[in-house]
Amino acid sequence: MAELFEYEMKGSKFTYLKDDDRGRKMSKIDRCLVNKEVFNEWPEACFRSLPRGHSDHNPILLSLIELNFGPKPFRFFNSWLDLPDCEKTVVKALDSFVFKGPPDVKLMRKFKWLRKHLKEWRDELLSKEGEEFELCNKELFELEMNMEESDLTEEEEWTRLECGLGLCRLWDTNVALLVKWIWRYRTEPESLWRKVIEALHDTKRSWTPIPFCKSSYSVWGTIVKTCSKIQVGGIGINQMFKGKIGNGKHIRFWLDPWVSNEPLKDVFPSLFKMAKDKRCTVADGLLMSSNRFGGITGSQNSRMIDGGNIELSRLESMMDGIFLSDEVDKWSWIGNKHKEFSVKAVKDFLNSVHDYSNRFVLSWSKWVPKKCNIFMWRVGLDRIQTASALRRRN
């Protein structure tokens, strides 16, 4: 009789789950048996039951060494400081802390209280970031279930490829991540990194919405120049940003798009040439408008050049009905109907001019060898290395 020993199982009590019309049955049919020599060599070993996933069996893992490093330490990353809700979480946690006792104990309890709230905020943040991934998995599962009943449409085929294989244009992703820096520059006016950018690149000699020094080669300059060259259907990607006026202190009157989809310096070039303060904010510009824009164009009776009188009348009519409020200025992304910025929204905008309606999708046959299906797929895409095809590709 073989002397076999069984280690203790951790993780779950059962390793098999059967769920059908007759009911649910759980049992422990997967085991790990070892001989006497192994058991004596590693007496503290155990085997663990891992998550079952989509299978009806739980995989088991034999662990010979028990590693226990204690509770996982809490780590705070400096990148969290750039997130808008981090500061609010810290302030809210400190304001809600109440404790009476010695100062050293109070300080220790305050740090513990703050760590608890930061952990909850971190977990909620990670949960939101994982929603898109979960949604993709759910959509992929639904498509695979539909495949069992009928053939997928062309749109569903491409959706399955994108969700299942993660196929997307790397260029689109890179551009979207670069545009995100432009969005952060506009929406974080009080951040330290923006002030550093302005100190290094704002030369006061150019009227670009996003400052960058043309004479120096830098990462920020590359980001701004790359984003300024991108156009989709003749529309620049920088035109997708539009300011929403609150108190008018963080949006510039001439240089930023706020009352129209283009900056006022491009809509009224003659008035912009005569403007005294070309970097004035909307709050200053509207204050000067009470004097018929005298503070902007020099004086009410100043000589108008290149149709300035017509532009001045148009500007005055455009300013009618615009009032400031106590709210903070905001920015919106007008590239989609929700007017909310995200990397996905930028990628959708970049692909908005592409038409996939006529994209060829091969219906694979299960009755022929796989290599025949692949060959016909390559024929449909004109990827066979024929003499004519090689000549076209040089």
Image: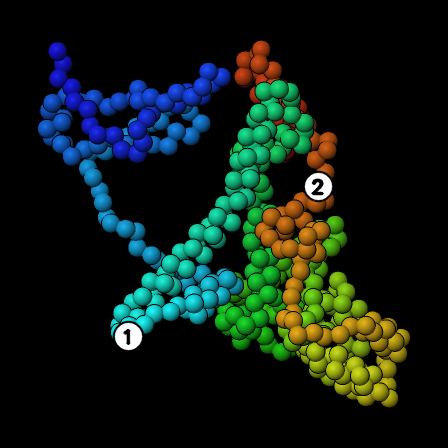
Under mark 2, the amino acid is His
Residue closer to the observer: 140 or 111: 111
How crowded is the residue under tag 1: few (<14 C-alpha within 10 Å), some, or many (20+)? few
What quarter of the picture does the C terminus occupy? top right
Residue 296: percent from left, percent from top: 76, 83
Residue indicated by mark 2: 354
Residue 210: percent from left, percent from top: 62, 68
How crowded is the residue under tag 2: few (<14 C-alpha within 10 Å), some, or many (20+)? few
- Asked where in the image residue 180 lies, by quadrant, the reply is bottom right
Residue closer to the observer: 220 or 310: 310
The image's mark for residue 103 is: 1
Where disc 2 sits, the SS reads loop
User: Hey, which residue is sitting farthest front in the picture?
Assistant: 100
Residue 151 seen in the current view: yes
What's the residue at 24%, 49% (across, down)?
70
Residue closer to the observer: 76 or 368: 76
Residue 213: percent from left, percent from top: 58, 71
The image's mark for residue 154 is: none
Where disc 1 sits, the SS reads helix
- Mark toward the viewer: 2 or 1: 1
- Ranked by sequence position, the earlier of labels 2 and 1 is 1
On screen, residue 199 versus residue 361, left or right, reads: left
- Asked where in the image residue 361 lies, by quadrant, the reply is top right
What's the residue at 61%, 66% (across, down)?
186
